[in-house]
Amino acid sequence: MHEHHSYTHLQDNSAEAIRVTWIGSIIDTLLGISKILFGWLFHSHGLIADGIHSLSDLITDFMVVAILKYSNAEPDAEHPYGHERFETLGTVVLGCLLIAVAGAMAYDSISNLLTDQEALIPAWPTLVVAAISIISKEWIFRYTRAVGERIKSDLIIANAWHSRTDAYSSLVVLIGLLGAMMGFPMLDSLAAVVVAGFVAKIGWELSWKSLQELVDTAIDPAEMSAITATAKEVEGVVDVHSFKSRQMGPKKLLEMHLQVAPYLSSSEGHYIGDCVIAKLTTKFDSIGHIIFHIDTEDDDDDPFCTLLPSRTDIRAMLEEALERHAPGQKMQRFTLHYIRGRVEIELFMSESSDLAGAQHAIRDEFAAHPWLLKINIWQPR
């Protein structure tokens, strides 16, 4: 098992994400107050509603800051893989909020269309405030999305799109204001329905992507193929199988079986595994955690562990065979190779041992076992 992740890097990303979120919250506060004030002074119910929408974004901003501080905390006893899934959960919530906002916008606009509600004629300063809101929210959207893409944070990207809904809302208000001034009040409602559909689509895409992560959907097949090919480039790796993957926030969690030559020592096999880890984490900086298992063959379809004797069983058989065919002779050690559903035994005798003709008898006795592949008996000269 290997853990590869820099929590200093995570904390830096978290600080940048929190900074951009606070900037957005300051803009939301100033815009919200301005819209409500100018809407009240110059008779625009749409601008007042848009101001309330802007102030409601503050709740989302505070939620994002809280989630970011928690999701980038180091692993603990309760969350040994880290807390990045909280960011994923937050993205789902934000996506659902976008869908809810879209539904409210569409419902209000369709109600206006059905009731033929007459729009009030506002004064020109409302146009200025709506235009400033569009420009400000579009800027914070682009800035926040750029940060989110740079630090690979779906939560920040989701919050960026949430900011853009405010820009669209202000655009709808602006169209409605212009329409009312020109004698076409229905433009407000029609534009709002179109924008609501676009906002709902964004909310669904964000939520669906994060829901797939929460149910441990595998990473992109092309990236899995690239990781597999890179692992096979390491000297000593025969093949890669049982490759499993999932996403956890910005990190990719991987499990894989690395097939090596059957007669390598366990320490050399582990060394090859460590070499694979080093190569993968150098080439793919999004990998956060890798568990590898060393295999001498592809054993996915045929697990023989319940059919073959254990080390304790084989030790007892060897001791009994030596007692029968070479009494008094001592075994120094033995090595077992489990290959293709059978067992190869390497028996090493002590320096004082003299098996003489007993070797053939021991081999013949073990050959009767169907699980035996081969037995080699080594004596010091």
Image (tube, grey):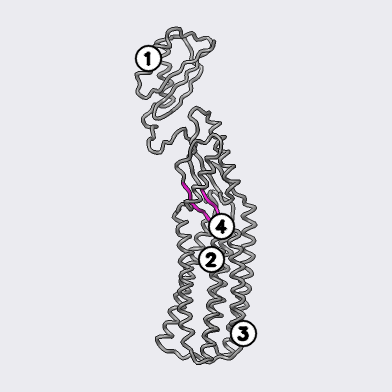
Q: Which residue is mark 1?
A: 364
Q: Which residue is mark 4?
A: 71
Please rate how many residues cluster around mark 1, counting C-alpha atoms within 10 Å: few if below 14, some from 14 to 19, many from 20: few
- Tell me, yes or no, whether the two marked residues, 2 and 1, touch with CB atoms within 8 Å: no
Q: Earlier in the sequence, mark 2 or mark 1?
A: 2
Horizontal arrangement in the rendering, residue 311 relative to residue 231 (left or right): left
Please rate how many residues cluster around mark 4, counting C-alpha atoms within 10 Å: few if below 14, some from 14 to 19, many from 20: many
- Verify whether residue 249 appears in magenta: yes
Q: Nearer the viewer, residue 256 or 311?
A: 256
Q: Residue 140 in the image: x percent, y percent?
A: 61, 71
Please rate how many residues cluster around mark 3, counting C-alpha atoms within 10 Å: few if below 14, some from 14 to 19, many from 20: few
Q: Which residue is mark 3?
A: 128
User: Alpha carbon of mark 4 to alpha carbon of mark 1: how far?
Assistant: 64 Å
Dot 1 amino acid type: Asp
User: Alpha carbon of mark 3 to alpha carbon of mark 4: how far?
Assistant: 40 Å
Q: Which residue is mark 2?
A: 158
